[in-house]
Every structure is written in structure tokens, then in C-alpha cells.
Image: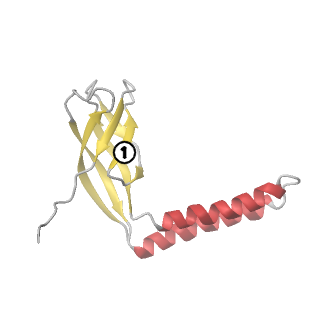
Amino acid sequence: MPIRTELPVSIQSRNFRDLPQTTGHITKIEFDKGDRTKNAMRFIGMGMAATFCAVFVPIAHWFLVPLLFVASWVFGLDKLKEMARSEGGKGPCPKCHKEFPIEPSTYKERITDTCSYCHEDVEILFPQPAKTEG
């Protein structure tokens, strides 16, 4: 079962680095091996169903069938490697200070987004885990 965690994030402007950072929050979803396998198989299954449906499209099936077949496996195996993802969240824009929604994405060290109000490009920085010396 996926584990959901609410995390604080720092939001900074990509264009105006001198603006102060603001703090928002996102929901992180971590997947165990069983969840990753289930997500990948679901994605591959939908791709195979689309491939089967493309067989009946005249002329276009000559390129749709191989394209959908390969794409379903490539993107399905990519889903298998996805350890965590951000479900989205909210935070204030560093430029206009209005709260905007943070879009869902793959959980990475930093992601980029755009403020819904002033269209400022922002960078969302996730907290780094504490390093232990030993």
C-alpha cells in the first residue's frame, strides 16, 4: 500500500533569485515493490489494449500497432522504476504571494512549476534527508 507523507517545501523564483523563498507543502507518495509492479502492469495492460484496438484501424495500424506496443513496454518499465511521486500541494508564490497549486509530478530533488496568477516560473525544493556521519 502506498505511503502518503505531507512534506514542507521551499519555493523560489527562477527569474528573480533575490526574492525571498516561501514555504509550501506537498504530499509525497512512496511505492513499495508490489505497488510499483502493479502500476507498471496496469500501464502495460492499457497499452496492450490500445495496441489491440489499433489493429482494426485501416492503414494507420501499420505504424500504430508497433508504436503502441513498444511505447507501452518502455513507459511501463519506466513506471516500475518510479519509487515515489509528488501528489501536488499548495504554496505561496515568491513574487505575488498568492497561494497557487503545485502540480503532481515525479518526486525529484527539485521541480519547476508556474504560478497560476502571475505566471512566474518557480522552483520547488524538497527537504534533503539528514546525512549521518559514521
Relative placement, left or right, of 88 versus 48 is left
Locate residue 110, reporting x and y percent: 33, 47
Circle count: 1
Query: How many residues crowd mark 1 within 10 Å: few (<14), some (14–19), many (20+)?
Result: some
The residue closer to the viewer here, 89 or 120, is 120
Residue at 16 percent across and 62 percent down: it is 131
Residue at 50 percent across and 63 percent down: it is 79
Relative placement, left or right, of 76 versus 63 is left
Residue furthest bottom in the image: 34
Locate residue 104, reporting x and y percent: 41, 48
Q: Quadrant of the C terminus?
A: bottom left
Give the answer, above or below, for where 67 lies relative to 31: above
Residue at 27 percent across and 35 percent down: it is 12
| Amino acid type of the residue tagged 1 in the rendering | Ile
The residue closer to the viewer here, 47 or 74, is 74
The residue closer to the viewer here, 107 or 104, is 107
Q: Where on the picture, by quarter, is residue 103?
A: top left
Give the answer, above or below, for where 54 lies relative to 90: below
Residue where numbered disc 1 is placed:
111
Locate residue 28, reporting x and y percent: 32, 56
